[in-house]
Amino acid sequence: MKSTDTKANVRLLKTLALAISTSGKPFVLTGFNYFSVSLTAVLKILQGAGSYFTFLTSMR
């Protein structure tokens, strides 16, 4: 889709450039700047918590 509004085009290009530059960096969570936790570890923790929750609700 083409826009004749040059300001909208410039905003779009800046947003696109920002999205490209931020997606090139790995996502890392830090715990009070003492340790870092990868996204994979966070997902495994959440998956384990969900499994444990399912187990506890099935025991009722």
Image: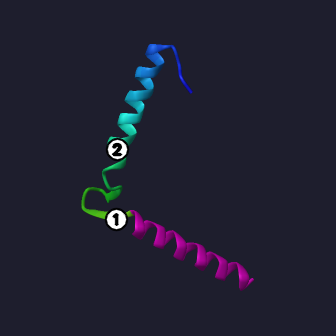
Residue 16 image position (x, y, % from top left): 41, 35
Quarter the N terminus occupies: top right
Query: Does residue 43 belong to the magenta stretch?
Result: yes
Main SS class of the magenta portion in the image: helix
Q: Which quarter of the figure has residue 19?
A: top left
Mark sitting earlier along the chain (2/1): 2
Residue 42 image position (x, y, % from top left): 43, 66
Left or right of 57 on screen, residue 32: left
Camera-side mark, 2 or 1: 2
Give amino acid for label 1. Val
**Disc 2 designates what residue?**
22
**Disc 1 designates what residue?**
37
Pick whichever, 10 or 44, lies toward us: 10
Quarter the C terminus occupies: bottom right
Give amino acid for label 2. Thr
Q: Are marks 2 and 1 in contact (CB under 8 Å)?
A: no
Q: Residues within 10 Å of mark 1 (few under 14, many from 20)?
A: few
Looking at the image, which residue is at 59% across and 73% down? 50
Range of residues picked out in magenta: 39-60
Looking at the image, which residue is at 40% across and 63% down? 39
